[in-house]
Amino acid sequence: MRLRRGLVLSLRALLAHRGRALLAVVSVAIGVAAVLVTSATGEGARAEVLREISALGTNLLVIRSGQVERSAARKQIRGRVTSLRLGDWRAIRTLATVREAAPCVDQRLRVKAGRGSASALVFGTSSSFFTLRGLKPELGRVFDPLDDAAAARVAVLGARVAATLFPGQNPVGETLRVRGVPFEVIGVLVARGVLVDGADEDGNVFIPIRTALRRVLGSAWLSSVFVSSVDADHPEGAEFQIRSLLRDRHRLAREKADDFDIQNQAKLLSMRRALADSLTLLAGGLAGVSLLVGGTGVMALMLLSVKERTAEIGLRLAVGARPRDVFLQFLVEAAVLALGGWLLGVALGAVGVGVAALTTDWPVAVPEAGLLATLVASGLSGVGFGALPARRAARLPPIRALGAG
């Protein structure tokens, strides 16, 4: 009963000063909305990083041909060395620390189908590449080891290339020409977009590696080799063995630098995840400061209310109200302001998250933990910042309070 009576008195007091109460509610709401929006974008970024990590694999190593050494006498020479060959790929996949390996050669070319044409990255590789990169066909199939062994003229299209060359139709079974060489389209990959390592398989055309080397590019060297290690948590062992193997195969002297580069995707993804976490913490800290400012606004309003209602407090104490009843009344008022601010902040945060999702490419996710955290923080700020004014009101001597009135 006392709590209900205190709540009624608190609501009456707040409604008597609607403008000030609204300012306090809005100050809390802004902090809550800021927390929710930053939490939503932070969780979205984290989910995106985890999706990309899942797509790439944390134990992925990429061996690429090294840059040509430049000297003062050969400034005009640039490009990559041509020492990475199919034999290196075969040797790499026999290592005990290597689970799977896929050779790759790529070149941007114009591909044609019917009267249409498009610029695409023609990617010669083996069937194991699709497993390594987590690529799955949406239509048809991907090529298999038999297609590669026979240097078959078959192609798998990225989603964007398929949509450009074959709009509104199923490309499987159609003919694609690359440098005048006809290829049968056997599959279309599920769209993935640009990944964390910059790869964009949606704009690629995949053909068997031997077909690419013999019939399209007319070369004998590779641009890269993709490798997954047996120990997914510690791919450094595979990286060390691969480096030793390639240096030996390329007959590099001890003092000579590598003519290849090995990229550890786990390090790249770890850096990306750490950056996303840092940004989330920074944004959360700024939003927390906003919530703190909102709590300060509640305290300022309650202190002003205690000063203006001194006579009311003295009268209540004089007619028998206990100091803890006065304390509870002002504490309830502060809690009501904080709860009202939280509800308004949730509404504003929902609008902010919706606008961010519609107007930007930044991923967002519903911050369930953020909702709970803001509710708890708002309640604590209301009680915490309202405790001082409530205590000051409860300790007022009745005679002094009545005299001030």
Image (tube, grey):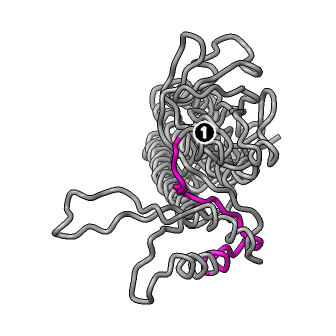
Work out whether residue 4 or residue 394 is closer to the camera in this orientation and state it.
4
Q: Residue at x 30, y 57 (%)?
A: 78
Q: Residue under label 1, please give it.
A: 201
Q: Is residue 241 visible?
A: yes
Amino acid, disc 1 = Glu
Left or right: 399 in relation to 141: left
Quadrant location of the C terminus? top left
Left or right: 327 in relation to 186: left
Quadrant of the image occupied by residue 158:
top right
Q: Residues in magenta?
A: 217-240
**Where does the image place residue 258, in percent across and percent down from the top left?**
45, 76
221 is within the stretch colored magenta = yes
Image position of 250 with respect to 81: above or below = below
Work out whether residue 78 or residue 53 is closer to the camera in this orientation and state it.
78
Q: Secondary structure at mark 1?
A: helix
**Where does the image place residue 201, in percent across and percent down from the top left?**
60, 39
**Where does the image place residue 321, in percent across and percent down from the top left?**
69, 48
Tell me the crowding category of disc 1: few under 14, some 14 to 19, or many 20 or more residues within 10 angstroms, Cα based. many
359 is within the stretch colored magenta = no
Looking at the image, which residue sits at the far bottom? 254
Work out whether residue 138 or residue 402 is closer to the camera in this orientation and state it.
138
Quadrant location of the N terminus? top right
Looking at the image, which residue sits at the far left? 72
Q: Residue at x 56, y 51 (%)?
A: 386
